[in-house]
Image (cartoon, grey):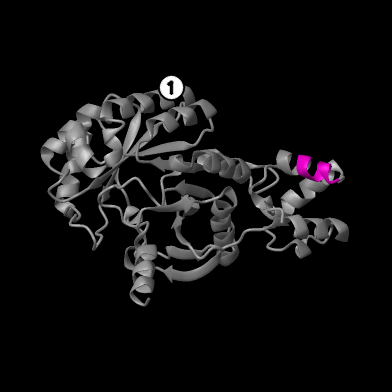
């Protein structure tokens, strides 16, 4: 039996060619595309301006992906919403909806699990299960908008998974997301976070998409970064910094460096001085993040005084640094925590 097509992951051009091969006029592709990405249809029967024969063809040869909200947590502190989504195959991913002065921002997942092995991250503890399809990434956005009744104006690819490890699907997702026949979200309102896949950073720079590159750095020297982030053994700090410089040169977009402060590991005065020496001459921004405590690891967050001291040392050396405002602290809003809890509970009942 022929495999059905994931119609929501098709570009408008692909959909046009596919329907043309079925004897359909070109304008039908635009209609179907808008139903999927502007009206966020969940079933072909909703596409009321299509002839019944076309709806039957789509039903027979295509499918529309969708996610279910398995769990929804709403912060009593700041109205942050954390979703645990269930995919059609039973796997789960997370998304976090955050309310800022400039509007709603959604943090989405790009993989089920992660294979990068960063030592203090809950997302990587179970390893990589599989990549998400473009449609499954879109579904996280569409479901959040349907559930909340508001448009998501900013997107962060910083949930479960390493976006650049799912490179082609993420690129297609961004293409669909920014389409004028869909959500029409400018990629200047998108931030993509990576642990430092240098080859993919260079490929992304060639695309000149205009999005913000956010690099999870977490240490300014190879010895310490090797111990925290296994990816550094393949692409050490020097190579990563060169790729970031090339990204800025190609796109004109300032790179943001994420630095999770871990008590007694990378938060000492000498760590701040080393970080300032590494990035101080670059057109960049440092975002300091008190690390989220994960029960399965021994890492603990730096105290408030240490965080303030670290930031002060950076700013004294000319580095623009901010401390990330914590959102959803009462609902385990850090990526991977809710999924990990659900997996643990499920496994314990088997």
Asked whether 196 or 334 is in front, the reply is: 196
Residue 121 lies left or right of residue 37; in this view the side is left
- Image point (51%, 48%), residue name: 154
Q: Confirm whether the magenta stretch covers residue 155.
A: no
Residue 347 image position (x, y, % from top left): 36, 71
- Image point (31%, 38%), residue name: 231
**Of helix, strand and loop, which mostly describes the magenta segment?**
helix
Position of 280 relative to 170 (above/below)? above
Which of the 4 image quadrants contains residue 193?
top left
Position of 347 relative to 313 (above/below)? below
- Image point (17%, 35%), residue name: 223
Segment colored magenta: 17-22
Quarter of the image with the N terminus is: bottom right
Q: Confirm whether the magenta stretch covers residue 20.
A: yes
Residue 135 image position (x, y, % from top left): 60, 52
Residue 223 lies left or right of residue 254; in this view the side is left
Residue 247 image position (x, y, % from top left): 43, 27
Asked whether 252 or 86 is in front, the reply is: 86
Quarter of the image with the C terminus is: bottom left
Position of 248 relative to 154 (above/below)? above
Mark 1 residue element: helix
Residue 232 image position (x, y, % from top left): 28, 35
**Residue most toward the front?**
1
């Amino acid at each position: 039996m022929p495999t059905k097509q994931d119609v929501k992951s098709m570009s408008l051009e692909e959909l046009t060619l596919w329907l043309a091969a079925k004897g359909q006029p070109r304008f039908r592709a635009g209609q179907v595309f808008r139903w999927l990405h502007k009206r966020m249809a969940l079933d072909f029967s909703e596409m009321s301006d299509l002839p019944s024969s076309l709806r039957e063809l789509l039903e027979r040869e295509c499918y529309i992906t969708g996610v279910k909200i398995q769990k929804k947590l709403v912060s009593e502190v700041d109205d942050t919403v954390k979703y645990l989504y269930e995919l059609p195959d039973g796997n789960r991913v997370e998304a976090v909806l955050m309310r800022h002065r400039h509007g709603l921002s959604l943090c989405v997942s790009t993989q089920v699990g992660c294979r990068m092995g960063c030592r203090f991250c809950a997302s990587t503890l179970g390893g990589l299960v599989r990549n998400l399809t473009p449609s499954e990434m879109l579904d996280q956005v569409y479901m959040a908008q349907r559930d909340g009744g508001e448009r998501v104006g900013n997107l962060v690819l910083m949930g479960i998974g390493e976006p650049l490890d799912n490179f082609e699907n993420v690129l297609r997702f961004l293409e669909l997301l920014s389409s004028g026949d869909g959500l029409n979200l400018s990629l200047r309102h998108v931030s993509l976070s990576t642990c430092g896949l240098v080859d993919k950073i260079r490929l992304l720079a060639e695309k000149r998409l205009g999005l913000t590159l956010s690099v999870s750095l977490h240490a300014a020297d190879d010895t310490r970064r090797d111990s925290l982030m296994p990816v550094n053994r393949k692409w050490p700090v020097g190579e990563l910094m060169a790729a970031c410089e090339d990204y800025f040169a190609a796109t004109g977009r300032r790179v943001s460096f994420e630095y999770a402060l871990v008590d007694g590991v990378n938060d000492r005065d000498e760590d701040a001085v080393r970080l300032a020496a590494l990035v101080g001459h670059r057109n960049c921004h440092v975002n300091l993040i008190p690390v989220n405590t994960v029960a399965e690891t021994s890492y603990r967050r730096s105290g408030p005084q240490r965080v303030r001291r670290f930031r002060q040392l950076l700013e004294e050396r000319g580095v623009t640094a901010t401390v990330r405002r914590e959102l959803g602290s009462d609902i385990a809003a850090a990526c991977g925590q809710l999924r990990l809890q659900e997996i643990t509970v499920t496994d314990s009942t088997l």
